[in-house]
């Protein structure tokens, strides 16, 4: 399936283990950086030497789900080495080489643009985000069960946001017997919430609205869980913020009020790294092959 393709996997967490396994299984030549402390060895993968001719053969570079930090540094839990993605290095790859990342920041976009290489933030894709919502929901259930002493069944749950994650969460909590309301900002989302048998809350008209609940789950990457909302929560309530860092909750205010509030990033990588790695592997492999097919047709 990927025979003849040269793919570098740089840094990451347990998700990359499954990704590397699949790339090997599908016949790709795999180059690794940031895995020197991994106990398991991949017989068919070789260490990536950033200064060697290997770089000139690469068809794709796969970065960790969080991408790089603001300086281009790539984090990896299997190495203490600091790997920095640099424009000069990217320019040594062939022009068709694509960079895959989970999410991208300004720095990474600029780097890719300057090196004239295509950057593909996988989590921007609906297919990846929807598949990924499955382990995200399972991780959320795990945290809710761990941090409450009451059942989900019969509890009042508010989910903020009806995107790829919010929709999966709202449906799952509803099926488990919770009384679910969903915070949305458009009339079409409100209609969808109603169609699902749930209660819509208009995020633009929260003033005076009853927001008390047992479990508040935020998926909106904006400061939406404000002191006004937190004030209404009973002392046993749990706030779980799934939105990308720094989340959308006033954590200081929640702490002051004695309300448990957790920022819970990266749940797929924590609860189901194998599934999450497989999701990335499937999509990346399809995209690499589509890209090379298009290049050949052009
Ligand atoms: P999404 O599909 O883009 O959904 C985001 C939702 O937030 C949409 O419903 C959007 O409304 C709403 N929204 C955005 N800004 C808003 C605002 N200012 N006021 C009201 N609503 C607003 O994203 P997603 O894939 O569901 O992911 C949601 C978040 O979870 C992201 O930050 C993502 O990085 C994160 N995430 C976390 C984990 C984890 O393990 N913790 C896993 C996956 C994703 P509209 O539809 O009206 O635009």
Image: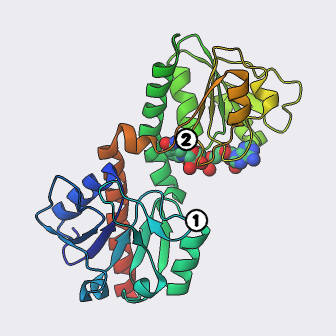
Q: Residue furthest front?
A: 80
Instruction: Judge whether 73 appears above or below 283 on screen.
Output: below
Mark 2 falls on what kind of element? helix
Q: Residues within 10 Å of mark 1 (few under 14, many from 20)?
A: some
Left or right of residue 43, residue 38 in this image = right
Q: Position of residue 61 (x, y in %)?
A: 36, 72
Judge depth for marks 2 and 1 and give the one in front: 1
Quick one: 116 or 265, which is closer to the camera?
Answer: 265
Tell me the number on the disc at residue 94: none
Nearer the N terminus, badge 2 or badge 1? 1
Mark 1 falls on what kind of element? loop
For the residues bearing labels 2 and 1, Cβ distance under 8 angstroms: no
Q: Indicate yes or no: mark 2 CB to ligand 1 under 8 Å.
A: yes
Q: CA distance from mark 2 to mark 1?
A: 21 Å
Quick one: 33 or 178, which is closer to the camera?
Answer: 33
Q: Quadrant of residue 9?
A: bottom left
Q: Which residue is mark 1?
A: 105
Q: Residues within 10 Å of mark 2 (few under 14, many from 20)?
A: many
Q: Position of residue 285 (x, y in %)?
A: 32, 65
Q: Taking the image as drawn, is residue 87 in sight?
A: yes
Task: Tell me what residue is drawn at x 76 percent, y 23 percent.
Answer: 211
Task: Tell me what residue is drawn at x 21 percent, y 67 percent.
Answer: 1
Q: Position of residue 141 (x, y in %)?
A: 47, 26
Instruction: Judge whether 246 appears above or below 298 on screen.
Output: above
Quick one: 98 or 41, which is closer to the camera?
Answer: 41
Left or right of residue 231, residue 30 in this image = left
Please count the marks in the image. Answer: 2
* Quarter that holds the C terminus: bottom left
Q: Taking the image as drawn, is residue 191 in sight?
A: no
Q: Residue furthest right?
A: 208
Tell me the number on the disc at residue 165: 2
């Amino acid at each position: 399936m990927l025979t003849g393709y040269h793919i570098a996997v740089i840094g990451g967490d347990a998700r990359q283990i499954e990704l590397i396994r699949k790339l090997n299984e599908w016949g790709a030549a795999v180059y690794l950086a940031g895995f020197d402390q991994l106990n398991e060895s991949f017989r068919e993968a070789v260490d990536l030497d950033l200064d060697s001719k290997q770089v000139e053969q690469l068809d794709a570079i796969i970065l960790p789900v969080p991408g790089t930090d603001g300086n281009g540094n790539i984090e990896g839990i299997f190495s203490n080495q600091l790997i920095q993605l640099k424009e000069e290095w990217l320019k040594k790859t062939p022009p068709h080489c694509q960079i895959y990342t989970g999410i991208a920041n300004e720095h990474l976009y600029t780097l890719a643009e300057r090196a004239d290489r295509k950057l593909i933030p996988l989590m921007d894709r609906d297919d990846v985000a929807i598949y990924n919502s499955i382990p995200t929901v399972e991780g959320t259930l795990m945290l809710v069960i761990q941090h409450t002493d009451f059942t989900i069944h019969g509890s009042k749950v508010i989910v903020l946001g009806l995107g790829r994650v919010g929709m999966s969460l709202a449906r799952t909590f509803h099926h488990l017997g919770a009384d679910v309301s969903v915070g949305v900002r458009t009339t079409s989302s409100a209609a969808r919430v109603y169609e699902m048998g749930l209660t819509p809350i208009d995020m633009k008209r929260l003033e005076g609205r009853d927001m008390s609940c047992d479990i508040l789950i935020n998926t909106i990457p904006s400061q939406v869980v404000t002191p006004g909302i937190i004030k209404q929560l009973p002392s046993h309530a749990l706030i779980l913020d799934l939105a990308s860092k720094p989340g959308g909750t006033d954590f200081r205010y929640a702490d002051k009020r004695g309300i448990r509030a957790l920022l819970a990033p990266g749940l797929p990588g924590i609860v189901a790294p194998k599934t999450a790695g497989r999701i990335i592997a499937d999509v990346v492999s399809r995209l690499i092959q589509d890209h090379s097919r298009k290049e050949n047709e052009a």
